[in-house]
Amino acid sequence: MKRKLTMFLTLFFVGLGVITAQTQVRGTVVDEAGEPAIGATVQVKGTTTGTVTDIDGNFTLSAPAGGRLIVSYVGYETQEVPVSPNVRVVLKSDSKMLEEVVVVAYGTVTREAKTGAVSTVSGANISDAPVVSMDKALGGKIAGVSITSSSGQPGASSSIRIRGTSSINAGNNPLWVVDGIPVLTGNTNDFLNTGNALASISPNDIESITVLKDAAAASIYGSRAANGVILVTTKSGKDGRTSFSARAKYGASWLANDNGFGIMNAEQLLTYQRDAAINAGYNPDNPTDPYYRPKELLSRPLTNWMDHLTRLGNIQEYEINATGSNAKAKYYSSLAYNKTEGVFYGVDLNKITGRINADYKLTNKLETGARVNLAYSDGNDVPMQSLYYSNPVFAGMMILPWTPAYDEEGKHNVGIIENSNTNPRATAEYDDQYGKSYQLLGNIYLQYKPIQQITLKTTNAIETVHGDGRRYWSPETNEGSATLQATMNKYVQLTTSNTATYNDLINDDHSVRVLLGQEAMKYTDSFQFIYAPDVNPDIPYAQTAPQSGVEGEQGYTAETLLSFFGMLDYNFAEKYYLQASLRFDGSSLFGSENRWGTFYSVGASWNIHKEDFMQDISFLNLLKLRASYGLNGNNNIAAYRSYGVYSSAQYNGATGMRPSRPANPYLSWEKNGTWNIGLDFTLFDKLDGNIDVYDRKTTDMLLDKNVPQTTGFSTNFLNIGSLRNRGVEFQLNYDIINNNNMKWDVGANIAFNRTKILELGDNEEIAYSEDSRLRHKVGKSMYSFRLLDYYGVDPTNGDALYRDASGNLTNDYNKARYIYPGSPEPKFIGGFNTSLSWNNFQLGAFFEFKGGNYVMLIERRYLESDGNQMSNNQIITALNYWKKPGDTGVNPKPLAGNSTNSYNFSTTRFLQRGDYLRVKDITLSYNLPTELLSKANVSGLKLYLSAQNIYTFHDVDWWDPERGVDGIGYGIYPMTKALIGGIELSF
């Protein structure tokens, strides 16, 4: 018996040893290129035992003989391999996962899981575009997003509208969020015609841009989300050893002109002016006549002033970045320099940007990281964006061709009588107009996961912009005494964002994500301004001016925002999705009785393709139906609008203060309620698309309402108006060919939007604050031109004709009726693109279009003046004028000194359709074969040539069809074309 027991115990422990025998595993994990995968997770299947790979991709661990190892790595497919003493795992890219993960508010989702209207542009599509700021690269790429330029100047900002315009007096631009933190936008320098705070971020540093278009996607941002939200994610460290890349690009730019627009040459102008003089009863060959225009003028030295005031601009950019990681840390850093010289003398922009992004695992549960961006910009400018005599765009078209460019001493001619003795070339050389900016955008986060399902995160950020500007008028330009203006400004925004997230999968089918958060923001801006006339030209600073004439001004503004929010995401079996959000915002911008607002959204989606009854449809990869409704707000108004304020006044010889604006303690947010229905689909693994239909209604719109004069005021700022935007969007992408040697894909999007004003308080119509030729009228679009009804030309005598109130024709300007002929708002916008790759060559092209909008060409009142501006040049379209009875489709007969008002810019004569199709970008690139580069330890070398804005199809009689959101911009810096070559090196 004892012997049997001993044998049994021996066999038991031997068997137990066999069962629990461990194998010491040594392995390496690499990617498809053979580079080590640093920080990959290796876990024994069915256990909690695991480890991560080191800087060389190596790992060691003990595992049961006959067991299995699970190897996972972000961006790659998870692999399962058998346990053995030596293991080598080659990871495969999970391209499907990389393509489908979308950054959204406070997290990420897959395409199958989204419930809102969300669109994404990859960083590759942004960095390849030769632009100074990232917003310029978005035009035409996303359905429903309109990017409108009011200037082609280097570094200029764009006006962005997502699904139309939603407000008259509050802002209409979207909220920009960079790496989870809302940031400053717009022009932060006083003396640049146009500037762009977003230009501080290098387009090459961007990983992706996501646009949140409907309330379900954006309402979690509450009072700042009425105009949509744009999320920018910058690059993080890539897994693997440190890799470097360097870029260099250089190119030239020139003024765009694709429809033969231009000014008259000397011979054309002289013929025009002689005819105008004769038509008015004068003799152009009589020296005593006021409009003496002898043919001898053509024998003088002649100048094409547009050529004289423009040049070939140039663009150059240099960048180097580094990225990498190890088992605990990931990092990305970059340094870039951009120098752009404009096509007008005196206009340039120099920019230096630097970025460091770092993430570090303190423990298995605790992680920290930082995102820091530094930028310095120095821009020089000349007077533009209005009809200044020193504006080279306007002056170049106005100055007479027989006026000499230089005086007898070879200096710039500043005795140009027809241009108020102003020469823009002298202004560019002798005057100062510049702005410098120093920007910091940084955040640091700490993230803790006490258990797998819970994540606690705090992110704290600071953004500062320090700027100084100088404007100096030199006496050498003949514009008066030496005068100086100088300014210093400072913008500071502090933000803290704190969230707690619970994410769990219950019983394999129920996925739940709950997020609770709190945010606070404080914003301040301050400025100092000095005006000093009669400074010493040899020492042109304020100290040298007579102190009695020096004036100074200071200003300070502050605003705060406190928020609490929550979000619920639920899905069942990855078929049925529900999302809800709720946010409470408290803002110092609004009245004491309405400081807090509540904003919410609810959305649902259904993955129809996952239903059992759809499984036999083999060509259908994705079919998703989405629906949502939400309410968000617009807090983009000036500070202190709810307060009663005072202004200085004089009475009976004494200076004092008087009330200038009444208080409104009930002033509150404009509210934006939006519903959206969308359909996403993928067919044949080739065709991706989505369709969205939406309706967004703005209520409590902020307007000035007339109040009884007995109050001491004429108006008060109240929440009384409403308007509606409705539209439909389509976006398609199709992979035509996708094999080892060739890839060809195409994409297109188009969006239709209609805006309608529903209520304006006790008004049926109010004038646009910038120009009374535009109106806001109940029942019509957001902007409607209100102009006198110009009919054309009387073929019998060349007089201008108008329609009167009865619809009859009249040549009396004063009897012309007012009509609403159109709107500057486009009825449709969109773009299309194609990309073709063959072996190491790639050709890409991108096109943008808009249509249904009108633009007003105010400058033509002076440049097509029917003889009113006899002291100035005219544009070539003015040559098409009435010459004899029977002429039709022409301009009125020119009359020297014309006083008939035929040239007036309050008529429909200078209103034109603004439709265009722009070839936005064409890029040809070549990647050198890797087998040639490997010998030099170089991983990649790309050469490319890019053409930007190379051609625009349009019928606007001007340099370019874009004239700003209101379609009425004048004296603007026209759009330019550019041809750029570059090289990219990776090692």
Image (cartoon, grey):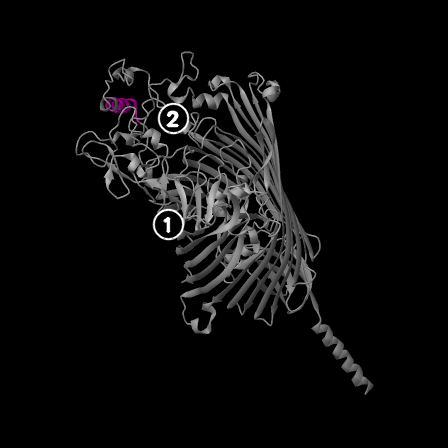
Q: Residue at 55% across / 59% down in the picture?
A: 600
| Residue 871, percent from left and from top | 33, 22
**Pointer 2 or 1: first along the chain:** 2
The residue at which mark 1 appears reads as 827
The residue at which mark 2 appears reads as 396
Q: Amino acid at mark 2?
A: Gly
Q: Which residues are magenta?
A: 264-275
Image check: 725 left or right of 226?
left
**Circle 2 Cα neighbour tier, 10 Å, few/some/many (<14 / 14–19 / ≥20):** many
Image quadrant containing the C terminus: top right
Disc 2 versus disc 1: nearer the observer = 1
| Viewer-closest of 869 and 496 | 869
Q: Amino acid at mark 1?
A: Lys
Q: Which element is circle 1 on?
A: loop
Does the magenta portion include 272? yes
| Viewer-closest of 602 and 436 | 602
| Residue 739, percent from left and from top | 41, 55
